[in-house]
Amino acid sequence: MNILFLSDNFPPETNAPAIRTFEHCREWVKEGHEVTVITCAPNFPNGILFDNYKNKLSQTEVIDGIRVIRVWSYMTANKGFLKRSFDYFSYAVMAGLRGLFVKTDIIVATSPQFFTINTGYVLSVLKRKPWILEVRDLWPESIKAVGAIQSDKTIQFLERIELFLYRRATHIVVVTDSFRKSIAARGITTDKIHVIKNGILLDKFQPSQKKPNLRETLEIKEDTLIVGYIGTHGLAHALDFIIQTVATIDENIVFLFIGNGAAKESLVNLKNSLQVQKIMMLDAVPQQEIVHYWHLLDIALVNLKKSDTFKTVIPSKLFEAAACQKPILLGVEGEAKELVEQYTAGLCFEPENPADFVEKLKQLTYDKELYDICKQGCETMAKQFDRRDLARKLLTIITQDKIHGE
């Protein structure tokens, strides 16, 4: 079977959409399918072209058996609404044009980039092929939550288009049960909505992959506890709250922030203005090196703004932390909190509540028995979300007879 996948992020980029798409597609290739991904030249999150790549009209490479077609796009840093919108739009147009010449039996388009899923729909009409809409974020709800769009009329217009696409998709794949309920509540039949949650390839995060002397390289003392946040530094992640709270604590702890994003510059400025010595801020590291930093941590921090919208999400960082058996300090309510509590994989604090954050941090820091229980809970949780099993489950949805008409 020929599968065409549209995603504007793909390795060597290291964000969650890139890794999820790559790991799923690689498993489908192993199952004997022909998989083509149309993406752009790697530049996320800084809008700077990666080494050894060119921003050409079209270029093709093969990565682990996946045919990867990279099309031209306008490149900009992951900040500023208008520039990013043009970035997404340029990719979607070029992906649509290039996709017309790709042989396929089915099309998969992934959100939250709004223009990408529109391209998936247009290609499905022009090529007369079914298409699957993968919803990784309730868009435009997430944009409302961070205040990127203020106009109610604009939001309503986008929501009408969103609902149109839901109705036209052959199937909808979502990453949380909450997403399924939300979409179904808008009149979409539940039969076409499938939940494939995020997960992890356990082989990538084995303890044996720990890099020696990394602590010394970063000049962190051996007796210092390390709390780490690894991922996008965006408007949704409320890392300013963490910096402001860390400035008030005296414990022998270092907070390690690794990543880039729209809020990175303002976060660095805030850290410097408050003279917070307990926080180290590093740029994003290559995907093959991330595992070393996960193993360096003692506690994994996962945090989002306090918003009803974010009660529906499960950050992919949870599964990476769990695979490395790093107890999770979670500042997210809703489904993510339920998951962590179900497996006792960490402690949850109320988002943007300084007192609760400090209290839960101290519990994980000083209660050795609790810490060990959470490590065991992480191991159990990770085993339940093996990416290979999830990829096969999604493949079953893609290849079932009623989708491609065999």
Image: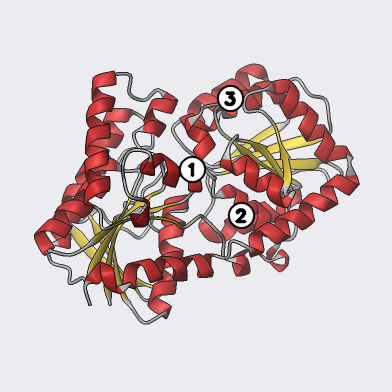
Q: Is residue 401 visible?
A: yes
Quadrant position of the N terminus in the picture? bottom left
Q: Which residue is mark 2?
A: 320
Q: Name the residue rendered at 24%, 43% in the picture.
A: 115
Asked which quadrant contains residue 38, the reply is bottom left
Task: Specify the amino acid type for callout 1.
Answer: Ser
Q: Residues within 10 Å of mark 1 (few under 14, many from 20)?
A: some
Residue 256 percent coordinates (x, y): 67, 40
Q: Earlier in the sequence, mark 1 or mark 3?
A: 1
Q: Earlier in the sequence, mark 2 or mark 3?
A: 3
Q: Quadrant of residue 34 in the image?
A: bottom left
User: Which residue lies most toward the left here?
Assistant: 126
Q: Helix or strand or loop: what does disc 2 sit on?
A: helix
- Which secondary structure, mark 1? helix
The residue carrying mark 3 is 240
As drawn, the label of residue 210 is none
What separation in Å lies between label 1 and label 3 (alpha carbons)?
27 Å
Judging by the rendered image, the residue that carries numbered circle 1 is 178
The structure residue drawn at horizontal position 32% and vertical position 58%, both measured from the top left corner, is 53
* Three-letter amino acid code at the position of disc 2: Glu
Q: Position of residue 236 (x, y in %)?
A: 49, 31
